[in-house]
């Protein structure tokens, strides 16, 4: 059944949604989101947990932050990341529940 025009998602919202989904559509980025669902982590903690090189992890964090999925804060030389977009957490939880 076709949706009426009033039920359609606005074009700019569709673009934002698409960018968010593209941002997390990568195995390393999905794992980063998964880790951060349990709370804030430093870049060093993420590198150790993921078992990836710092350069790769930083690149993936940058993508997620630029798309509004993550936020960061600095404490001296240490950068901490956490989830900015709670919708991504909900999406991840829904997908994980379907896989179980």
Image (spheres, helix red, strand yellow):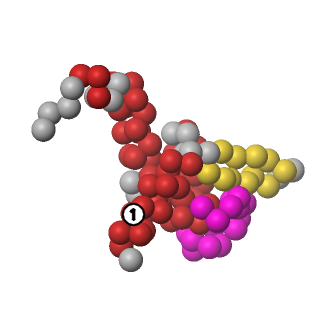
Q: Nearer the viewer, residue 89 or 24?
A: 89
What is the quadrant of the C terminus in the image? bottom left
Residue 39 lies in magenta, yes or no? yes
Q: Position of residue 7 (x, y in %)?
A: 29, 28
Region of the chain picked out in magenta, as a range = 37-54
Residue 30 lies in magenta, yes or no? no
Q: Does residue 38 appear left or right of residue 15 in this picture?
A: right
Residue extending farthest right: 76
Q: Nearer the viewer, residue 20 or 100?
A: 100
Q: Crowding near pointer 1: few (<14 within 10 Å), some, many (20+)?
A: few
Where 80 falls versus 52 (above or below)?
above
Residue extending farthest bottom: 100
Where 13 falls versus 90 (above or below)?
above
Picture residue at 36% right of the left edge, 73% below the top: 99
Q: Position of residue 70 (x, y in %)?
A: 60, 47
What is the quadrant of the N terminus in the image? top left
Give the labeled residue for mark 1.
Answer: 95
Picture residue at 47% right of the left edge, 63% below the top: 93
Residue 62 visible, this angle: no
Q: In the picture, residue 34 is in which quadrant?
A: bottom right
Q: Position of residue 67 (x, y in %)?
A: 51, 39
Mark 1 falls on what kind of element? helix
Where 54 falls versus 62 (above or below)?
below
Q: Does residue 12 appear left or right of residue 32 in this picture?
A: left
Q: Nearer the viewer, residue 98 or 33?
A: 98
Picture residue at 62% right of the left edge, 61% below the top: 36
Q: Position of residue 12 (x, y in %)?
A: 39, 24
Picture residue at 36% right of the left edge, 39% below the top: 18
Residue 52 visible, this angle: yes
């Amino acid at each position: 059944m076709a949706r009426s025009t009033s039920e359609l998602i606005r074009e700019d919202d569709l673009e934002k949604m698409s960018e968010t989904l593209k941002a997390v559509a990568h195995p390393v980025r999905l794992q980063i989101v998964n880790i951060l669902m349990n709370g804030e982590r430093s870049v060093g903690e993420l590198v150790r947990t993921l078992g990836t090189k710092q350069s790769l992890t930083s690149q993936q964090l940058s993508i997620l932050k630029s798309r509004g999925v993550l936020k960061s804060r600095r404490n001296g030389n240490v950068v901490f990341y956490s989830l900015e977009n709670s919708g991504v957490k909900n999406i991840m939880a829904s997908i994980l529940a379907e896989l179980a």
